[in-house]
Amino acid sequence: MSNILVVGSLNMDFVINVKKMPLSGETILGEDVNLVPGGKGANQAYAVGKLGGQVDMIGAVGDDLYGRMLIENLQNVGVGISGIEIIQGTPTGNAFISVDEGGENSIIVVQGANNKLTTQMIDKHVDLIKRADIIIMQLEIPLEVVEYVKTLAQEKLIILDPAPAQDDLPKQFLEGFTIVKPNETELQTLIGKKLETKEELISGAEELLEKGIQTVIVTLGGDGALLVTKDKTEYFKAQKVTAVDTTAAGDCFTAALALALSKGKAYAEAIQFGNSVSGIVVTRKGAQTSIPTMEEVIEKMKEEEKE
């Protein structure tokens, strides 16, 4: 099994359950609020660790209670935390997440210490990059850090989860990533077009390939995922589940994909594994609190085979 490195964000999530999302100018009552470890990078590292993978993380937290809680939570599932910097005078990042009755969410992220991660800090942990076979990154940390890690890891399998999506990325930013994994909304933002049908999504993914990416995997929520390369396009259906909270589903798909690839699995099997993991995550509340063990995933996949 290969070693995985996550370079990304760590946030403490404030999760508010609501009956419906508020309209502009509307005040609504929340049903409850929970404090849950999160951040796209931390979610991915935690998921790899909980699923039994070998994983390290590079990121930044503040010198505060939330930062210590996030680090401890990662350690609990075996994530290597030597690459996590503690930043003085800046709070740990936060995310404010509203979840409606259908399990859909809206998220506001305050970057905090995540925005203080620098290329100089990356240089301190270049040994982690050299040791890794697969590297996962997202866009909740400075773009220059993502680009710098990419230049240091040209021989690695590099996965970019392009969230939060940005429509003003530098022209050559996406060039050189092995895999870019947007969801439908993120794909539309990246190419600047509205995509409503599966055919339009495939066309959008093909357009993304032209930016110098080897493989595009588009997650479609409860509808599964699309694999698009220069040679083929393949659709992978997801099992139907009743979602209660979609927070971290995409993060866990990415983590599961990376873990399966680290074990030498082909894309098809890795994507199906990702669908199974995220299919469990959406049936539970919270980010890292919703992530299953490998035993739970294997049991679910056995049930899916019977259906």
Image (tube, rainbow, N blue to C red):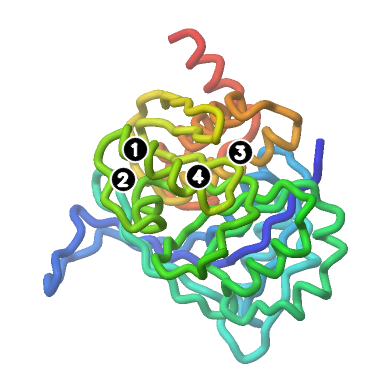
Q: CA separation, marks 1 and 2? A: 5 Å
Read off the residue under disc 1: 243
Mark 2 or mark 4, which has the lower sequence index?
A: 2
Read off the residue under disc 4: 290
- Say what amino acid the circle numbered 2 marks: Gly
Q: Would you identify the image quadrant in which residue 64 lies?
A: bottom right
Question: What element does badge 2 sit on?
Answer: loop
User: Where residue 241 sits in the image (x, y, percent)?
Assistant: 36, 28
Q: Would you identify the image quadrant in which residue 138 lies?
A: bottom right
Can you see residue 68? Answer: no
Read off the residue under disc 2: 103
Mark 2 or mark 3, which has the lower sequence index?
A: 2
Q: Is residue 34 above or below residue 60?
A: above
Residues at marks 1 and 2 touching, judged by CB atoms closer than 8 Å: yes
Question: What element does badge 4 sit on?
Answer: helix
- Say what amino acid the circle numbered 4 marks: Ser
The label shown at residue 305 is none
**For the residue carrying disc 1, how many other residues have a C-alpha within 10 Å: few (<14), some (14-19), or many (20+)?**
some
Q: CA separation, marks 2 and 4? A: 13 Å
- Choose between 202 and 186: the one closer to the eye: 202
Is label 4 or label 3 in front?
Answer: 3
Q: Is residue 148 above or below residue 150?
A: below
Read off the residue under disc 3: 256
Question: What element does badge 3 sit on?
Answer: helix
Q: CA separation, marks 4 and 3? A: 14 Å
Q: CA separation, marks 3 and 1? A: 19 Å
